[in-house]
């Protein structure tokens, strides 16, 4: 396998200012490692994409900036949530002579008749697994061939994954990686009865109960409207009476006024 390299330079723009870098075709990077002070770097986006396409996160890349060179693994590649655009990446500095723990993707291949027919579902519970090995021995991916499984109810745990003298798996041996589970059947509602046919007893009773509730609700609604109209009518009558009572009674012009004698 050919040696992969990535050229970079030190980065001065930090924080929100990195947007300017992206507009100019550069990708902000962060170099970190054990007993190493992290360093802000940048590289041309096109160069990074070409390198990462081959290396993924499992192959060693030789990073070059100024007069320095470091063996790294590309990690934590951040992408835009809606566009296929890389926004940032971390570069993990490693020692080629020391073992390291690395996340390796799991790839499922093959077909299983019960899954193909819809009788069972393939449930993938882990899409990557941690391995420990020398950086130059990291597997590109861990392959699981489901065509070799027995059928519904079959399981694959970490202890069942392919073995190698180059690496060992980290984590619980009994941890479930994938499972062939019985497919859940959707309940189909029975078709409505044809005209002239009686619905099943339980269904008929439920239908009758719903109709009664509907009729009761309509009657209650009508009663409320009638009651409301009557109350408004009564209120109007009372208002009219109140107005009449508040008015001064008109004096009879033919009746003599009190305190004065009639002229003879």
Image (spheres, rainbow, N blue to C red):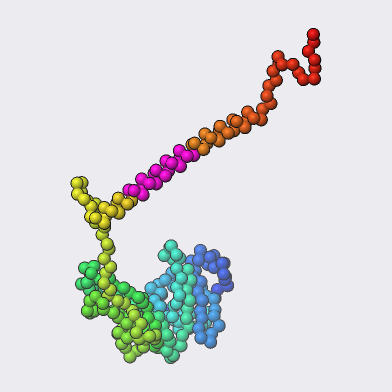
Choose between 53 and 179: the one closer to the eye. 179
Residue 112 appears in view = yes
**Is residue 53 rendered to the left or right of residue 12?**
left
Question: Where on the picture, by quarter, is residue 152?
Answer: bottom left
Out of 109 and 176, give the one closest to the viewer. Answer: 176
For the stretch drawn in magenta, the main secondary structure is: helix
* Residue in the image at 22% along x and 72% along y: 114
Q: Is residue 219 magenta?
A: yes
Q: Quadrant of the C terminus?
A: top right
Identify whether 252 is placed above or below 212: above
Vertical side of 155 occupied by 15: above or below: above
Residue depicted at x 55% and y 73%:
11
Q: Is residue 89 above or below residue 214?
A: below
Along the line of sight, the residue nearer the viewer: 196 or 86:
196
Measuring from the top left, give residue 155's x and y in whole percent: 28, 79
Q: Residue extending furthest top?
A: 264
Rendered residue at 36%/77% (across/down): 126
* Figure disc tally: 0
- Image-quadrant location for residue 100: bottom left
* Residue 65 screen position, x and y as percent: 51, 79
| Residue range corresponding to the magenta coloring | 211-228
Q: Is residue 167 magenta?
A: no
Q: Residue at x 39, y 43 (%)?
A: 219
Instruction: Give the percent coordinates (x, y) of residue 231.
Output: 51, 38
In which quarter of the view is residue 102 placed? bottom left
């Amino acid at each position: 396998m050919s040696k992969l390299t990535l050229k970079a330079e030190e980065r001065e723009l930090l924080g929100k200012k990195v947007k300017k870098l992206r507009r100019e075709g550069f990708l902000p990077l962060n170099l970190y490692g054990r007993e190493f002070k992290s360093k802000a770097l940048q590289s041309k986006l096109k160069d990074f994409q070409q390198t990462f396409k081959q290396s993924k996160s499992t192959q060693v890349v030789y990073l070059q900036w100024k007069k320095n060179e470091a063996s790294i693994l590309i990690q934590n590649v951040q992408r835009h949530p809606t566009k296929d655009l890389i926004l940032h990446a971390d570069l993990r500095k490693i020692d080629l002579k020391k073992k390291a723990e690395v996340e390796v993707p799991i790839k499922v291949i093959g077909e299983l008749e019960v899954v193909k027919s819809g009788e069972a579902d393939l449930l993938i519970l882990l899409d990557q697994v941690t391995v420990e090995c020398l950086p130059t021995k990291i597997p590109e991916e861990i392959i699981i061939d489901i065509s070799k499984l027995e059928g519904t109810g079959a399981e694959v745990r970490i202890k069942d994954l392919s073995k190698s003298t180059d690496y060992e798996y980290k984590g619980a041996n009994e941890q479930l990686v994938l499972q062939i589970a019985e497919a859940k059947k959707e309940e189909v509602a029975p078709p409505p009865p044809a005209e002239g046919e009686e619905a099943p007893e339980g269904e008929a009773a439920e239908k009758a109960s719903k109709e009664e509730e509907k009729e009761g609700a309509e009657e209650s609604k009508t009663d409320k409207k009638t009651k409301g109209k009557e109350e408004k009518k009564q209120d109007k009558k009372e208002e009219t009476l109140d107005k009449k009572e508040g008015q001064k009674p008109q004096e009879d012009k033919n009746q003599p006024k009190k305190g004065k004698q009639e002229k003879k």
